[in-house]
Amino acid sequence: MDVMGDKATLFETGRFVQPSGEEAEADPDVDETGEAAEEVRLRLAADAGDVEAASVLGALLLRRADLDGAEAHLRAATAAGDRAAANNLGVLLHQRGYADEAAGWWRIAAVAGSAAAAHALGRHHRERGDEPAAEYWLRQSAEQGHVLGAYALADLLEHRGDDGAEQWMRVAAERGHREAAYRLARALDRRAAERGALERGAADSAEPGRAGRAAGTPGAGTGATGAADRTAAGRRTGAVRDAGPRSGTGLGVPPAEEAEQWYRQAAARGHRRAALHLGAILERRGELKEAGRWYLTSAKDGEARAACALGFLLRDAGDTENAAVWWLRAAQDGDGNAANALGALHAERGQPQTAERWYRAALDAGDVNGAYNLGLLCAEQGRTPQAEQWYRHAAYAGHREAANALAILLLQGGDTTGAEPWFSKAAEAGSVDAAFNLGILYAGRGEDAAALRWYERAAAAGHTEAALQVGIARLRDGDEQDAELHLRCAAGGGSAEAAYRLATVLDARRPRPSAHELGEVVHEKTECEEWYERAASQGHRRAQVRVGMLAAARGDVVEAARWYRLAAEAGSRNGAFNLGLLLVREGSEPEAVVWWTRAAREGHGRAALRLALVYARRGELDEGQRWADRAVTLGPAEVAERAARLRDALRQELTA
């Protein structure tokens, strides 16, 4: 058993002195001499018939593992009615393998009032499956204030699902039992998580369909997770705030806050898993320095998950070398997440063989992310059959992003029929990218209603491009209010196309500018202009042209030219045409001709008409007629009509 002697009784009688953590370390030689002298004194007293001395001497020899020497003294003291000796005799017999005889002596001591013996007897009955007897004796021990009895009783009640378990776990924790403090914290953590899930569920039901985050661009295959982030998800969870010390009763303290207090108490007593959880709480709260200290404490005590977390903390701080040291330590202790992190690190360094070795180690450790990452690695190297094999391995194990990646791989190979069920499986498992890709798949078939359902699902989970597609569909259906909502979500998530389309919606509502008095501020940017500019700054060509037009309208020629030039250089016909118009007004017709030529060759009818007029004025009638013919072909109707008249006039001039 883990307790020798009725310590409470021994401390009360003064036979043992409670050690103090503040006392200076004693000289070993002095301690040994003093202990030897004490043993001689006890032997003399025991030989003289002192029951108390015999009991203490037996306990001393038992701690020293001198079972033969201890047994005689303990039996003598027990025969004289010493309950502490009866308890320790039970411990001795239990160590010798005589469990039933040990239980008999524990019962004698427990009936005589020994809380330690009641605890030992309770554990004995539990080991034999007699839970009613175990509960009876453990409760006797706990109610006498025995901390191990309280913990063992709590463990038994928790095993049975009894609501009284937390009460006794709290009693043990309050009396300094570190494992009880840790387990109480875990229970409170779970309660806080359940409460949070209920609150989120209530919020979701009250406000359905709201889009949040966003990423990616339209097109099949955009949903696949990139190779840059290969480590397993779920390393961090939500944060809680420390409200300072509270009463140990837990009354009025939110479960998350109280859990942190108990984690801290257990960690301070050397509980490595408590230190790990405390570090995670502090990291989520942004207290990285203290989080690192607790991770380090836990990692040094052999907690692989703490070593892995410490590695991530160091990596985020830019110290990849030391991060690799801790990941290596964790991976060697069987942590799959750390092995995946090492694989990603070596992949980023251009060491695919080493990366593959660590991904395989992660898979061997039971981390299915290893198979997914092996698939990503093979796909990057063009080893498509191997990539498919690893994606399938992970997908069959329930890895939703692997299922999505497998579907993309099949789709790229032309196997639409094989891709669809994997997209569906991934989407049903919660993959936002897979839901978006299903929308693309159905849209490609012309099944717009089915596509919209999946776009809506992905948008509700925060997918930017899905929100854009829903916004476009709503505009097409005339539901401008809902369209604006989705476009705002997508634009806020970084979609340039969504920002442009949102700007056009707001622009259409904007009243015509009123006349202004001389000296009055001519222009103040509206929200629609701000969205145009955001889209333009992200490289959206039509937005760049529109921003240029707005700048030109307020007389800012330099700004207008800058935006037109950006759009034109990116291949915008309208940008090139408008830049040409601006250059002509500024007296730079030769450069304007260059940009109009570029626009006309890209199919801009008005640019072709302008070129025809320029060459006609210069007397280059053949060239003017050629561009007039081009303008007639390109249109639109108004341009074609004017170009036809000019072409006919040039022909008459040439044949005159």
Image (cartoon, rainbow, N blue to C red):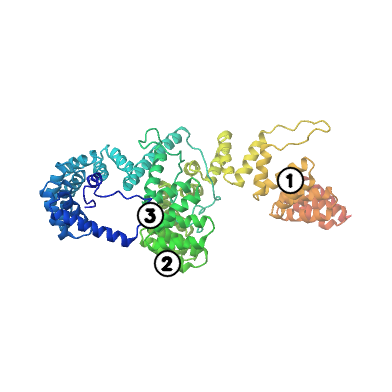
Q: Residue at 62% across / 43% down in the picture?
A: 499
Tag 3 residue: 24
Task: Between label 2 and label 1, give the one nearer the viewer.
Answer: 2
Q: Which disc is residue 246 wearing?
A: none
Instruction: Judge from the rendering whether residue 595 lies leftward or rightward of residue 41; answer left or right.
Output: right
Instruction: Judge from the rendering whether residue 412 lies leftward or rightward of residue 75; answer left or right.
Output: right
Kind of element beneath mark 1: helix
The amino acid type found where label 3 is placed reads Ala
Quadrant for residue 469, please give it. Answer: top right
Image position, residue 231 (x, y; %) = 45, 57
Q: Which of these two is toward me, 523 or 591?
A: 523
Image position, residue 169 (x, y; %) = 30, 41
The amino acid type found where label 2 is placed reads Arg
Image position, residue 654 (x, y; %) = 86, 56
Q: Earlier in the sequence, mark 2 or mark 1?
A: 2
Badge 1: few (under 14), some or many (20 or more) residues near its Cα, within 10 Å? many
Tag 1 residue: 548
The amino acid type found where label 1 is placed reads Gly
Distance from disc 3 to disc 2, alpha carbons, whole Å, reads 51 Å
Are discs 2 and 1 less than 8 Å apart at CB?
no
Distance from disc 2 to disc 1, alpha carbons, whole Å, reads 54 Å
Kind of element beneath mark 3: loop
Q: Earlier in the sequence, mark 3 or mark 2?
A: 3
Q: Earlier in the sequence, mark 3 or mark 1?
A: 3
User: Can you name the residue that lies furthest to the left here?
Assistant: 79
Tag 2 residue: 357
Q: Which of these two is toward me, 445 or 307?
A: 307
Badge 3: few (under 14), some or many (20 or more) residues near its Cα, within 10 Å? few
Badge 2: few (under 14), some or many (20 or more) residues near its Cα, within 10 Å? some
Quarter occupied by the C terminus: bottom right
Quadrant for residue 393, please give it. Answer: bottom left
Kind of element beneath mark 2: helix
